Amino acid sequence: MTHITDHIAETVERVRKAQSDASQSAEIPVILAVSKRQPVAAIRSAFECGLRNFGENVVQEALPKIEALAALEICWHFIGRIQSNKTRDIAAHFDWVHTIDRFKIAQRLNDQRPRYAPPLNVCIQVNQAGESQKGGIAESGLRELAAAVTGLPRLRFRGLMSLPPAAGDPENSAPYFARLRELKEELEAEGFAADTLSMGMSRDLDVAIREGSTIVRVGTAIFGPRPDL
């Protein structure tokens, strides 16, 4: 797993440099290691290198990993599209959910969150380009959903998440990231407690950090190409 050690060091330095170049606050964005299709050994190796936040997007794949690594103080993030029949497992086993896009799902997560657990941290996913193959709510419905989520006692509304259209040039993502930041700032001005922007991946995290990202979702830059499980 030596390559993971090297990749993490390179990613941390890349994130620090991007933050410094952007003249942002001293707080470094959270590196969320996207561990989709990665074996338990790779996640453990990344944890031993200092990473604490891991993201999964398929519930049935994530649960055995969470169980196998239960002794480690890992913060688990769900970053995939949410099916109604999976909300109970998500509510019980994850610390964050980045992909709320309708009230029905938020309500189910709230109702199914165990009483012994702290409120579930959630972000609303915004579908900025209207791509039918992606989840997310349109901007026009964002405020209503944010208000509804904020009113649920077992959820803690944290901010916004977006996945811009794929593009060869990372700079093509910049307008989407900038707009997501504007939406977050507008919500804050209206009294919402939004402190999180989940945006940026391996290819465009530098641009995302420049535009104010607080969580970057990094998979291949840490683990390399995803293996076939």
Image (cartoon, rainbow, N blue to C red):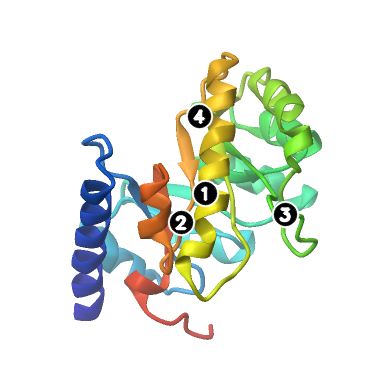
Task: Give the residue furthest to the bottom.
Answer: 228
Give the amino acid type for the residue marked by disc 2 in the picture: Gly
Q: Earlier in the sequence, mark 2 or mark 4?
A: 4
In the picture, measured across the screen, residue 9 lies left or right of residue 165, that is left
- Which numbered tag is attached to residue 135? 3
Give the amino acid type for the residue marked by disc 4 in the picture: Ala
The residue identified by callout 2 is: 200
- Judge whether 118 appears above or below 56 on screen: above
Marks 2,4: beta carbons within 8 A: no
Q: Is residue 11 visible?
A: yes
Marks 3,4: beta carbons within 8 A: no
Pointer 2: residues within 10 angstroms few (<14), some, or many (20+)?
many
Pointer 1: residues within 10 angstroms few (<14), some, or many (20+)?
many
In the picture, measured across the screen, residue 200 lies left or right of residue 74, that is right
Marks 2,1: beta carbons within 8 A: yes
Q: Earlier in the sequence, mark 2 or mark 1?
A: 1
Q: Is residue 74 visible?
A: no
Distance, label 3 to label 4, CA atoms, is 27 Å
Please name the residue shown 25% across and 37% down the image: 27
